[in-house]
Amino acid sequence: MMNDMRLTERVVDATKIKISAKDVQVYYGASHAIKDVNIEILDKTVTAFIGPSGCGKSTFLRCLNRMNDTIPICRVEGKILLDSEDIYDRKVDPVQLRARVGMVFQKPNPFPKSIYDNVSYGPKIHGLTRNKAELDAVVESSLRKAALWNEVKDRLDAPGTGLSGGQQQRLCIARAVATSPEVLLMDEPCSALDPIATAQVEELIDELRTNFSVVIVTHSMQQAARVSQKTAFFHLGNLVEYGDTAQIFTKPSDPRTESYITGRIG
Amino acid sequence: MENQHILSAFDRDLEAVQAMVVKMGGLVEAQIVDAATALETRDEELAEAVRKRDKAVDKLEEQINAEAAQLIALRAPTASDLRIALSVIKISGNLERVGDYSKNIAKRTKVLLQMQQINGSTSALRRMALAVEGMLKDAIDSYIQRDEKLAADVRSRDIEIDQMYNALFREFLTYMLEDPRNITACMHLHFIAKNIERMGDLATSIAEQVIYLVTGEIPDDERPKSEGVTLANHPEI
C-alpha cells in the first residue's frame, strides 16, 4: 500500500524540525489567550491550524514571526525556536526574522504601487540583490512561484491593486516568497477568494512545500484536509490535538477534535 | 456519537441511510429463515416467495449506495461520520450477498423437490441457517447499539458455523459413497451448506465493520477458526 504514489505523497520527514514551541503562553492584558502550547513544526511540510473563532490559532501563528510585538498589551512567554534559535532573544531583529518567516494575510493587501514594486520591495530593503538584473530575476521567479507570472508579465508597471482578488492574493504570496523565507505563515489566505482562485492558491501551497515550511490558519476544514500533511486543533487557547492530517480527519483521538471536525456542538 | 450536528439536516441524512440498513438487515434475516424453512418443509410456494423477494433486497442496496454517495458528496463527512458512510456501503453490500445466497437456496430447493429426500440433512441445514440468522441479527443489533462487545461475540461464533459445515460435508460425502443415486441431491445440499457457511462469513464481516465504526480500527485476523476441510481429513477422496 505504501507504494501508492498518492499515499506516499502525504508522508513527511518527521526528523527535520523547523520551529519548536515550548510552553508558550500568550496574554492580552489579563486574558490568557494561549495556554501551554508545545508543538514541533516540520520543515518542508504544510501544517494547518484549525479551530473555532477565538481559539487562539491566529494568535499563535502571529507569535511565530513576532507579529504580536506590535500589540502593546500582548505578552508572550515560553520559548519559540527557529532552527534551535530563540526568536524572542534580545539579539534577534524582528525585521530580519520576518524576512525568514514570511506572512500572507486574510485579505490581499498589495502596496499601492506597481506589481513590480510590490515584489521587489522586500529584496530591496533587505539588500538581497546587487543590481537591477538580479532584482528583475527575483521578481520574475517569485511571480512564477506564485503562479502569476504569465498573467502579469506584460503589465508589471500596472498597479497591484488593479488585479482581481485572487491575483492580488497571489501577488502577496509572490511578495512573501521574494525574500526567500524559510517559513511561510498564511492566515486564512483564501477566505476572500472564489473557489477557482482558492484552488490555484492551494496548488501553490503544495508547490511551496518543496522549498519552505508552510503554516496555514484556515476556517475551512476541507481546505486543511486538502493542503496539509499535519494538522493542529486549537480550542479555548489550548492545543488539543496535533497529528497527521489523515489521522485527524479519519480517527481523531480527542473527543473535542471529533466534535469540531464533524460539525457537532463540542 | 450522541452529540448532534449543528446542521440538523446532516443528522437526518445519517439517520435515514442507517434506518435503511436496519430495514435491509431485517429483510435479509427473514430471507434466511424462510429459505431454510422452505427447504426443510419442502414448501415450493415459500421457496418461490424467497426468490421473488430478493429484488427488494437488491433495490435497498442500490438506494443505500446512492444515499451514501450523496452524503459523501454533499456533506463531506469526517471521522465517525465518514466511518458511518463507509460502513453502510460495506454492510449493505454484505447483506446483498446474504440475500443472494438465500435466493440460491430457494432455487436449489425447487430442484430438490423433484428428488428423493436425504435423511434428516435438511433439518441440520435449517439449524445451521438459524445459527447464521442469529449471528446476523446480533451483528445488526450491535450496529444499532454501537456495541463493540456484541460484534466481537458475533465474530467468535463463526467457528461454530464452520464446524457445522465440515460435519455436513462429511455426511454428504458418506451418502454419496453409499449410493451414487444420491449424488445430484447431495451436490445441491452441499452447495446449500456452503452458501450458509458463506453467510456466516458475511455476518462476521458486518460485525467487523461495526468494530471499525466504533473504534476506527479494523480488527486483526486473530479469531478462532476451524481447520477447514482438508484432504488429510478425507484420505478416501
Image (spheres, rainbow, N blue to C red):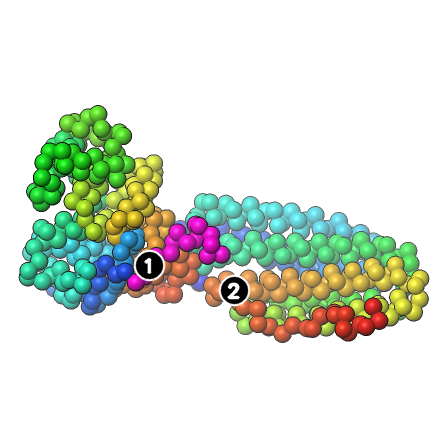
**Local crowd size for mark 1, using a 10 Å CA cut-off: few (<14), some (14–19), many (≥20):** few
Residue B131 position within the rendered picture, expressed as x and y whole percent measured from the top left: 70, 69
State left or right for residue A78 relative to residue A53. Answer: left
Residue located beneath label 1 in the image: A13
Q: Is mark 1 on a helix, strand or loop?
A: loop
Give the letter of the chain under mark 1.
A
| Nearer to us in this view, B15 or A218 | A218
Q: From where the camera sits, is residue A78 visible?
A: yes
Residue drawn at x 36%, y 59% as measured from the top left = A244
Classify 10 Å Cα crowding around label 2: few (below 14), some (14-19), many (20 and above): few
Q: In this view, does A93 lie to the left or right of B60?
A: left
User: Which one is in front, A172 or B114?
Assistant: A172
Q: Is mark 2 on a helix, strand or loop?
A: loop
Query: Is most of the magenta stretch helix, strand or loop?
Result: loop
Q: Where is residue A104 in the image (x, y as percent from the top left)?
A: 20, 45
- Please state the extent of the stretch shown in magenta in the rendering: A1-15
- Front residue of A122 and A261: A122
Which residue is found at the position 87% from the left and 70% from the top?
A: B174
Give left or right: position of A24 versus B213. Answer: left
Where does the N terminus of chain B fall, quadrant-wise?
bottom left
Residue A112 in sight here: no
Q: Nearer the viewer, residue B36 or B5?
A: B36
* Quadrant in the picture for the C terminus of chain B: bottom right
Would you name the residue on which mark 2 appears? Answer: B218
Please, what is the three-letter code of the amino acid marked with disc 1? Answer: Asp
| In this rendering, position of residue B72 left or right of residue B65 | left
